[in-house]
Image: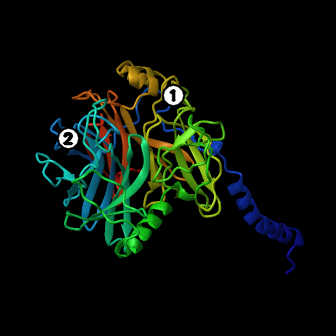
Amino acid sequence: MIIPMKPIFALLIALLLAPLAALHGAEGLSAADFRYSPPNLGTGRLPPPLPGGTRYVIVNRGNLDPRFGAFSTLPNVAHFQGRLVVTWQNHVKDEDQPGQRLQMRQSTDGGKTWLPDLAQPPTALSPSLGVMLAKDEKSTALKRTQWNSGFAFTDAGERLWAIANVGENFDKGLGLLALELKPDGRRGDALWLEQSPVTVDEGYPIYPAMSDPQVAAMGKTIRDVIDDRTAQHAVSYDNKRRDGDNLNPATVRHPNLPGSSADGQRLIEPSRPYLLKDGTLVRFWRNYGNAMRDVFIWRLYVSLSRDHGKTWSTPERTAIPSNSTRQIVGSLPDGRIFLIHNPYTHGDDFWQGADAALLATASPAEKIGGARKVLTLSLSDDGIHFNQAWTIRVLETPPRSEGHSKRHYDAANPAATIVGDDLFIVYSLNKEDIELCRVHLPDLTR
């Protein structure tokens, strides 16, 4: 049997060109390819609620009692030794003010109940490194502030550390503090992830630093884990701050020192990267406005890496709407990519009639920044086109107490972790309460 040569030749050419085509496709990916088009887009209706099996529970309720603190936000969640651990940053009244500290509650029953009991103050992970004050109060204390900067697992997941970023007001550069969380729910040792300890007020605990041989190795291990899961290895962007144009990458140490995008907008809080099928790493960034924070684009920005995270492209604007709040992305066990964020924006009419209706109930500050009262979960099969969405929370209740940087109807700053077939999502409500949403993943049908 004689086989014609032309079909064989054509097949060989196709096989040879296929890898090149795939490579070209990967190299050709750009911010313009990232799309957001859930079914309700443009209808004036919110995305549907999460499936009926979804469960909601309050993890912590803010309280003017100083032991509780009325201002709670920026939660993080981890699963450790059969426990759900939720941490957040807390203050008596205001945000990012002297005395802001980290608090924690844990659950041993999948988030149904929390320890300590909600009637009791949450666990204080460390004494605040300064006197806790309301905004504008006078003090001669060292005005230390702690920010909740996530978790670090070491020893093959056998040890868990909560990370506090310590500084003064908005300067987070004084030092990183690691606080060990024990499997039985107690707080263990603490150490500075710095060569020298950070000075604290008289009477407060003095923790060892990495200059101490007894903790040097552990400190380095924790720092390596932290650096690996942030934008430490992203290219350094010109931050275009009013105080100068120093190069400074956004890291867990400086999560609010912005880089600049291709169009000059400042960017902060890069997401943890996720992997596309072609091997490209994707990282989203939060838009932080121009140098004066008076012009916002209200879109997520994206940077890409094609060398396993060694270098990253300059972030560019996507068409994915964002309220300029923290977003969370990750991979589900079935391979889909999830995005949890606030998609409603001001002056965009992205959802047509829905945007105007939402903003009509917003506070003046919220109208400047967009609507944060709607938090959504979106999914993508390929990590590029997000074409499914559900509403996690629509907040209709105003804050119970006043406070600096509070917005009316604010369900925002999400974090998430996956345990088996469940996605656990935490977020703050009006920067007062911390709520957890448990989603059974098999219910999120395509």
As drawn, 245 above or below 125: above
Query: Does dot 2 land on a helix, a strand or a loop?
Result: loop
Which badge, 2 or 1, comes first in the chain's sequence? 2
Mark linked to residue 320: none
Q: Quadrant of residue 276?
A: bottom right
Instruction: Identify which residue is drawn at 37% across, 33% down.
Output: 374
Q: Along the horizontal axis of the image, is 443 left or right of 4?
A: left
Q: Where residue 364 appears, x then y in whole percent?
A: 39, 20
Mark linked to residue 61: 2
As drawn, 81 above or below 383: below
Circle 1 sits on which residue? 350
Q: Quadrant of residue 61?
A: top left
Instruction: Identify which residue is drawn at 74% across, 59% down.
Output: 21
As drawn, 347 above or below 188: above
**Label 2 is placed on what type of residue?**
Arg
Nearer to the camera, 72 or 58: 72
Q: Along the horizontal axis of the image, is 85 left or right of 384?
A: left
Q: Where residue 30 appears, x then y in whole percent?
A: 66, 47
- Neighbour class for label 1 at 10 Å: few (<14), some, many (≥20)? some
Q: Along the horizontal axis of the image, is 216 left or right of 57?
A: right
Nearer to the camera, 155 or 278: 155
